[in-house]
């Protein structure tokens, strides 16, 4: 069967389009869940998000004690879309549910990208680009750093972009509109979608989209987040001089464009990346400027669909090979490379022992836990972050910290202060130190 024949048969084509997504889901879920089981996930942010979703699942507020007593997550970032995970969390409570849901959402975003790529390059070339998209560094960084709400944004944006390429304007807006419920910076991306429509002559729909997105963004940042925030402010509004960290920012732009051989710059769809790059580069937080963490995942569908938006004919031969080769090369330094490590598939006795030690803490207990230990406890305990707690004002019944010397002066000081706060050793070994106190002390 020829590639062109395969691409024209709807049923076969649907299977071919689904293959990269299914494979990516398996890879994403395996990498993230095994990482958690090997005690390499963190309270910031897997534990925080589990606490918030656990609050929703209990018909309460999405509070996160890891960020402080009574901290309401909607006063930190605006992500009410997380309530969609509640039915799954109620059936399967635990951090792995969040990681598997994230894997599914990120993998689904490969469907519109692969579908569009097959139309442009045929079955083999399109499948290669779909795989390259799923293996792109921005997606892998998201998979490798716990759970984050942007996993909802990636598929919504991917389907919206496909509709823009196909000139299905109303559908593009319908897919983009829920981005407003994902995070407070994404209304700017929705406005950019409206701007793209205006650029293509759809002034009424585009103008309405821009106005609605801007109004929603202002409402979220100026009213809703402050309403849930104890200080009644939006805590991420500070900016920096645009030239701060310029080499790091330029490297990020280079890395965004390299996966597509710089061909994404030929399409105005790439303009939709400007809001995300803009807020990140304007921020005073250097963590936003580079290629680490999960912040670049939303840029991957933009840059790949921009590449697929009427690519030049001369690129048809080498472009799929370049995309896949570049993604495969970087994978040797990215989270999915762990799947090729034999150690990933061997039982981790240290991690098993650590989890067994933590099970000495009873369900429902209040615990001050180290960042690495926190997500092992958030499904069944009320967890605060050590070394900030225990304190004179808040003394959880249990303390769980690593059984290893710390280089953090705060952790050293907090550990030395435990006896004065009424704590006594409860257990040690298996890489964990447990302390407890009498509830009345």
Image: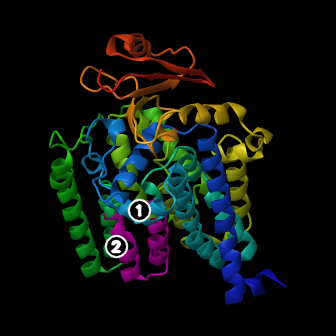
The residue under the point 52% across, 45% down is: 146
Secondary structure that dominates the magenta span: helix
Residue 349 lies in what quarter of the image?
top right
Q: Can residue 261 be seen in this view?
A: no
Residue 333 lies in what quarter of the image?
top right
Position of 307 with respect to 419 (left or right) is right
Residue 390 lies in what quarter of the image?
top left
Position of 206 with respect to 84 (left or right) is left
Q: Is residue 110 visible?
A: yes
Residue 327's spot in the image, x, y percent? 67, 52
The answer to whether mark 1 and mark 2 are in CB contact below 8 A is no
The residue under the point 50% across, 74% down is: 162
Residue 219's spot in the image, x, y percent? 17, 59
Front residue (pair 361, 283): 361
On screen, 81 above or below 49? below
Question: Which region is colored magenta?
Answer: 152-180
- Residue designated by label 2: 199
Q: Residue 86: which numbered mark, if any?
A: 1
């Amino acid at each position: 069967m020829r590639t062109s024949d395969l691409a024209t048969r709807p049923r076969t084509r649907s299977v071919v389009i689904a293959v990269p997504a299914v494979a990516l889901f398996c890879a994403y879920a395996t990498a993230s869940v095994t990482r958690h089981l090997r005690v390499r996930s963190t309270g910031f942010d897997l534990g925080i998000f589990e606490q918030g979703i656990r609050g929703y699942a209990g018909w309460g507020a999405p509070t996160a004690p890891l960020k402080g007593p009574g901290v309401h997550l909607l006063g930190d970032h605006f992500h009410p879309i997380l309530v969609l995970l509640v039915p799954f969390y109620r059936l399967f409570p635990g951090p792995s549910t969040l990681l598997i849901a994230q894997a599914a959402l990120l993998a689904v975003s490969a469907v519109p990208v692969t579908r569009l790529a097959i139309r442009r390059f045929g079955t083999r070339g399109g499948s290669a680009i779909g795989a390259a998209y799923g293996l792109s560094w921005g997606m892998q960084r998201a998979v490798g750093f716990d759970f984050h709400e942007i996993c909802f944004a990636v598929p919504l944006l991917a389907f919206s972009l496909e509709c823009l390429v196909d000139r299905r304007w109303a559908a593009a807006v319908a897919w983009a509109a829920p981005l407003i419920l994902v995070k407070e910076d994404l209304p700017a991306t929705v406005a950019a979608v409206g701007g793209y429509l205006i650029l293509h002559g759809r002034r009424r729909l585009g103008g309405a989209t821009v106005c609605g997105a801007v109004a929603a963004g202002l409402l979220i940042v100026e009213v809703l987040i402050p309403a849930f925030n104890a200080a009644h402010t939006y805590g991420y509004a500070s900016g920096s001089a645009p030239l701060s960290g310029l080499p790091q920012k330029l490297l990020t732009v280079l890395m965004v464009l390299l996966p597509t051989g710089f061909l994404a710059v030929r399409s105005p769809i790439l303009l939709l990346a400007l809001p995300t790059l803009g807020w990140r580069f304007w921020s005073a937080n250097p963590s936003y400027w580079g290629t680490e963490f999960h912040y670049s995942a939303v840029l991957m569908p933009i840059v790949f669909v921009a590449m697929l938006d009427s690519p030049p004919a001369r690129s048809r031969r080498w472009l799929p090979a370049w995309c896949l080769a570049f993604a495969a090369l970087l994978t040797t330094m990215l989270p999915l490379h762990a799947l090729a490590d034999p150690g990933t598939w061997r039982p981790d006795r240290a991690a098993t022992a650590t989890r067994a030690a933590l099970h000495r803490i009873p369900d429902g207990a209040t615990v001050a836990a180290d960042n690495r230990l926190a997500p092992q406890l958030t499904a069944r305990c009320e967890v605060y972050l050590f070394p900030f707690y225990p304190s004179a004002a808040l003394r959880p019944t249990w303390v769980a910290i690593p059984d290893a010397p710390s280089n953090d002066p705060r952790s050293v000081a907090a550990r030395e202060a435990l006896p004065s706060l009424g704590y006594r050793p409860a257990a040690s070994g298996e890489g964990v130190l447990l302390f407890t106190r009498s509830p009345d002390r």
